[in-house]
Structure formats: structure tokens, C-alpha cells
Image (spheres, helix red, strand yellow):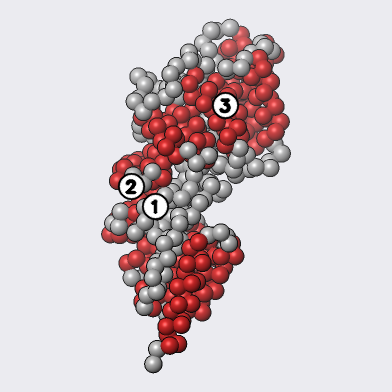
Amino acid sequence: MTRLLTLVVLSGVACSGAAPVPVAPAASTAPGAALTRPAPVTASSPAPLSTVTTPAGPAPVLPSLPAAGAKPSAPATAAAPPAPEPAPAPATDGLARGTDEPADRELAQGDAAYQAEKYQQARAHFQKAERLAPKDPAPKVGLVRVSVAQADLPLDYASAPHDPRILPLLRQLDAALKLEPDFAPALMERGQLLLIQGKAEAASTALERAAVLLPRHAEAQSALGVALLAQGRANESLSYFERAAALDRDNPDRLGNLGAAYLLQGRTSDAVKAFEKAAQLAPNVARYQSDVGTAYLAENRLDRALPALQRAVDLEPQRATYLANLAYALQQSGNLDKAVAAAERATQLDPKLGSAWLNLGTARAKRGELDQAEAAFKRAQALDPEDPRAKANLEELAELRRKKSAAP
């Protein structure tokens, strides 16, 4: 079973300019997927009612976490830090080393059972391997992987900061690393669990070493990219996402991560290419449709954005972020009635989604419904008092009211 780090991208379209402003990724995958930081808003000058407030594009976001259970390969010879160029062949997954010793045979059977999601069998094989080779860190890592899979832990960045199940697993990994400090699979698992806790800096310490030890392992490179991005080190993270995509070329998750990283760099045309390929590889996955649609918005390609965003909603009609993105695009197209309906539905599905309230407010303001617009902007402001977008729109709304009352 392969569980990957997936970058969350574009999804919370709100009030700061997806079309006019370079768009950065925003949460679009699983719940808890990503440190959302809304893009700064440029308050437009007071405008007539027909153009009041500018709906914003997707708020910037972080990749969703590497899967804590992504299967790192056996330790490799230390190599130079990863570069964008692809290595000759990707590293193999699994904990068995191919020695054909009794403990290693158990590891191999545990790997196979884990891949097949037969976790009870996998646990039994890893436990037997641990009894046969108590000083080998590999069985301990295998048992952690099984525990993560069976616990069904959320695998997004900072998605389980206080989950009590994580600390004992980290202790098991520490015990494995005491036996062999450079055991790459243990470093990988440790880094990924720390990412789930939202501890990006601590995670990067383990993942930087894992990425050096596993230069041909796509998940090792991608996980480190997430850790760096979570620390605001976007420039450094990009090369790791590029390398992961090069090592795992036809994996839509890798392409999605890469596209999100490009967006954070303002490289929208590169992001569009990555998202387009991801959407082609997985046409029935709503996230990729939403991602490519929002990237099209960043390039002002409304004719292509609308069908993709509508497709995302059709595939996952209960996902509020997809509806919020669609509401923004509908506003841009001038279809205010549908925009209001989509934004209202988004707020019903997720009352805490600020971007949905902002888009609802802008759509209602453009329809001349100033009281309802103000109420929506105030809801957004209450959710995030630091978000400048709600404040800018409320100020613009007040200016419109002043002009309207002063008119003869």
C-alpha cells in the first residue's frame, strides 16, 4: 500500500484576487490539509455597485503531508543532496535487505503483507523478525508503519497535533534509531509523524538526512519539500518537489505537489502544466480538477477554469472549498446568481471557511444586497481577524454606502 505526501493546492477562493493576483495553492485535498495563509488583498478603490469588491483567488497553502506510512527503501549509500535531475532508477520500497536470513525473510513477508494492506499478517511477520533480530531497527519500523495504517491517522500537515497515538510511535522510532542512527526508513517515518503533528522544523532534521541517504526515493524528497515549505522556505523546497516528480513521473500526487510549489513561486504557467498532467492521469479525482481550474484562474483563463471547477464540484459536491472556488469563477464570468448559490452552499457545508463567506459577500454586493454582503464579510472577519481581505471589503462597502447616501 503506497501512501504519499500530497500537496494541497488551490481551493479556498476568497477575496484577494485569483485572477488579477498570482495565486498560491490552498487546501484542496483531505481535511486539515495545509497551513493556509490567505493572499494579501489589494483593496480596490471605491467602485460603483456593479463592481464592488474583488473576489479573491485561492489562499496560499501548504502541501498536505507525506503519508506517515509511505514506504521508504532500505538504507542507501550516502549521496550528495538531491538535485532536480532524475536519478537512474527510483529506490525500491520495503524493509527487507534480500539477505535470505530468517529475520530478513520475515521482513520480506511483512513488506508484502503491508503492501497488500493485510496489516495483521504484516504485524505478525515484523514481530517475528524482531524476535529473530532484536538489534535490527527494520522490524521496529515495520511495526510503526502497521500501527499508523491501522490507526488510520490523518496524513495532512498539522492534521493531528495532539493525537495521543503519535508519541508512542515516535518513541519506537527513537529506539530503532538508537540501534542505527542512519537507518533511513526510521528517519523517514519519524519525519512524517512530526509533520502530522505540525512540527516542521523538527521533521526537517530527520528528513534532510533521509533525503541524502535515499536520493532516488521520491517520497523522501517530497516529504522534505513539505517540511521546508511549512517553514516558509519555498525556494528551497521546489527542487525536492521537482526531483520527486522526476523520480515518479506518472504519479498525479507528485505532479500536484509540484504544481502547488510552482504556484507558491508565482510560476503559474509551470503550475498549469503540472496540474494538467495530473488531471489527465486521474480525470475522476476532484482535487486535480480544482487545482488545474484554480491555476487557470491565476492566468485569467476563465473559459478553461469554469469547466474544471464545475467538474470538481460534480465529483465531490460536499467539498466546500471546491464550491468556494467555483463561486469565485462564476462571479468573474458575471453569473452572480449561481455564484451566490455556490458560495451559500459552501458556507453551509463549512461555516468556518472564510473564503466562502468572502465570496458570498462580494457576489451579494455586486447584486446590490449590501446588508447581506456586510453580514458575510463580518462572518469572514470573525473567523480570521487578521485577514486583510474582509477589512478591505468592509471599508469599500462603507464607502459605497456613503457615496450612495450623498447622491442627489
The reply to whether dot 3 and dot 2 touch (C-beta < 8 Å) is: no
Q: Residues within 10 Å of mark 3 (few under 14, many from 20)?
A: many
Q: Residues within 10 Å of mark 2 (few under 14, many from 20)?
A: many
Which residue is at a point 52% across and 23% down the rendered structure image? 210
- Spatial CA distance of label 3 from label 2 is 31 Å
Regarding mark 3 in the picture, which secondary structure is present there? helix
The image quarter containing residue 149 is: top right
> Does 115 sit left or right of 288 as displayed?
right
Amino acid carrying label 1: it is Val
The answer to which of marks 3 and 1 sits earlier in the sequence is 1
Amino acid carrying label 3: it is Ala
The reply to whether dot 1 and dot 2 touch (C-beta < 8 Å) is: yes
- Spatial CA distance of label 1 from label 2 is 8 Å
Q: On the image, numbered disc 1 is attached to which residue?
A: 23
Q: On the image, numbered disc 3 is attached to which residue?
A: 206
Which x, y percent locates residue 317? Answer: 47, 58
Which residue is at a point 46% across and 75% down the rendered structure image? 397
Residue 341 vs residue 297, the one in the foreground:
297
Which x, y percent locates residue 65? Answer: 53, 39
Residue 268 - label: 2
The answer to which of marks 1 and 2 sits earlier in the sequence is 1
Amino acid carrying label 2: it is Thr
Quick one: which residue is furthest to the bottom in this view?
A: 408
Regarding mark 1 in the picture, which secondary structure is present there? loop
Which quadrant is home to the C terminus? bottom left
Which residue is at a point 30% across and 57% down the rendered structure image? 300
Which x, y percent locates residue 200? Answer: 57, 37
The answer to which of marks 3 and 2 sits earlier in the sequence is 3
281 is higher (above) or lower (below) than 218: below
Which x, y percent locates residue 348? Answer: 55, 65
Regarding mark 2 in the picture, which secondary structure is present there? helix
